[in-house]
Image: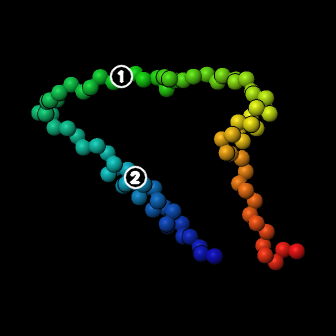
């Protein structure tokens, strides 16, 4: 089982501080004027186009089975038994 020295753990905060300093944005020079206005954000609701659940009336089971039979659906045909099957 490897043993981790305390010196390694003391280096972690310094490494995090150094990496976070590189992630800071560069300052904008003072003599730079904005060239255009930014676009105005538009609001779009997450619920736009939402349709509430509508409980559909189930059809009778015989009618459902007949619909599946007419469409050719259902279980796949069984595979033939092996030749050495008794």
Judge by depth and name the residue closer to the eye, 54 or 1: 54
What residue appears at the point 56 percent right and 70 percent down from the top-left corner? Answer: 4
Judge by depth and name the residue closer to the eye, 58 or 27: 58
Element marked by disc 2:
helix
In percent of width and height, residue 29 lies at 16, 38
Q: Is residue 85 above or below residue 27?
A: below
Image quadrant of residue 31?
top left
Colouring chosen for the image of the structure: rainbow
Q: In the rendering, which numbered label is found on residue 25? A: none
In percent of width and height, residue 84 lies at 82, 78
Q: Earlier in the sequence, mark 1 or mark 2?
A: 2
What residue appears at the point 40 percent right and 21 percent down from the top-left corner? Answer: 43
Q: Is residue 9 left or right of residue 19?
A: right
Q: In the rendering, which numbered label is found on residue 42? A: 1
What residue appears at the point 79 percent right and 29 percent down from the top-left corner? Answer: 60
Q: Work out which residue is located at the far front of the displayed protein and give it.
A: 70
Q: Is residue 61 left or right of residue 6?
A: right
Q: Are marks 1 and 2 in contact (CB under 8 Å)?
A: no
Image quadrant of residue 42?
top left
Q: Work out which residue is located at the far bottom of the displayed protein and give it.
A: 84
Q: Is residue 14 left or right of residue 53?
A: left
In percent of width and height, residue 28 lies at 20, 38
Tell me the quarter of the image containing the C terminus. bottom right
Element marked by disc 1:
loop
Q: Is residue 65 above or below residue 8?
A: above
Q: Is residue 64 above or below residue 13?
A: above
In percent of width and height, residue 8 lies at 49, 66
Q: Work out which residue is located at the far right of the displayed protein and give it.
A: 86
C-alpha gap between disc 1 and disc 2: 37 Å
Reading the image, the residue beneath label 2 is 17
């Amino acid at each position: 089982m490897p043993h981790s020295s305390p010196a390694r753990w003391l280096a972690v905060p310094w490494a995090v501080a150094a990496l976070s300093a590189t992630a800071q944005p560069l300052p904008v020079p003072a003599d730079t004027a904005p060239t255009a206005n930014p676009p105005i954000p538009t609001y779009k609701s997450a619920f736009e186009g939402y349709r509430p659940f509508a409980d559909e009336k189930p059809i009778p089971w015989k009618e459902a089975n007949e619909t599946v039979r007419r469409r050719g659906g259902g279980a796949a045909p069984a595979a033939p038994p092996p030749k050495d099957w008794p």
